Image (spheres, rainbow, N blue to C red):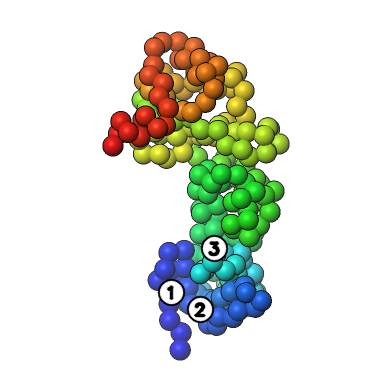
Amino acid sequence: MNFIMNIPGLKGVIPTRFEDVGGVIRIYAEIERKVQRCPVCQNRTSSVHDYRIQKIHHLKWFERQTQIFYKRRRYACSCGKRFSEKNPIVQRYQRTSIEWNQAILIRAVKGKTFKETGENYGVSATTIVRRFDQLALSEIRPVEDLPSVIAIDEYKGDTREGKYQLIIADAVTRKPIDILPNRYKKTIKHYLQKHGSQVQMVVMDMSQSFKAAVQSALGRPVIIADRFHFCRYIH
Ligand SMILES: [Zn+2]
């Protein structure tokens, strides 16, 4: 008997078997067979060409590493095109689930170090850095004007560009807005001169000289607060 999963990241997924292999949870899964529209000729087809088993790294379940063995269905169209079904688990050419990718982006931004995040998610720090680089570019929209209250945090990332990166966030919603490749004063200066015309308050726990650099980049008086006082202020 199959049931359709209704949990975040695996909505619509049908697990066919669970296994525990040396402490790693394997979820064998497929999705429902449905009529598909051919990406080439737009005709409908429900004729199955074949199946491929795809091993996907997923978020931990119950503190155990978890892999999805996704039986990915390929359909055949009468025009000759063969194509994979659309699925909620994994994007093309990826070996990690969509859910994992999203979690990693959040953790990469909010976690302490890439190394620690890697350990928590069962991959190397290098993998996290790579994901961080790719996702930071794709998920964060280009910024025009920063909001009036921003937070600047440093993050020990050890990427190609430098040991530390700067995360620019909306201090109120705490949403990351941008990531700067390093924490050189000239980088933040250039960035704030370009995007900071609306900024009135900056929340950060950085050195005095860095604070002064931020102040002078904005070219007008702004309130610079440390995180502790800002948190007390908004609560
Ligand atoms: Zn077709």
Q: Tell me residue 36's x, y (percent).
A: 49, 70
Dot 3 or dot 2: first in sequence order is 2
Instruction: Tell me if 50 is positioned left or right of 200 in this view.
Output: right
Closer to us: 205 or 134: 205
Query: Disc 1 versus disc 3: distance between alpha carbons?
Result: 15 Å
Q: Tell me residue 4's x, y (percent).
A: 43, 77
Judged from this view, the residue extending furthest toward the bottom is 1
Against 228, residue 91 (above or below) is below
Q: Tell me residue 88's x, y (percent).
A: 49, 64
Label 1, ligand 1: CB separation under 8 Å: no
Query: Disc 2 versus disc 1: distance between alpha carbons?
Result: 7 Å
- Which element type, helix, strand or loop, lies under badge 2? strand
Closer to us: 141 or 235: 235
- Which element type, helix, strand or loop, lies under badge 1? loop
Mark 2 touches mark 1? (CB < 8 Å): yes
Against 64, residue 3 (above or below) is below
- Residue type at mark 2? Pro
Residue 5 tag number: 1
Disc 3 marks which residue? 59
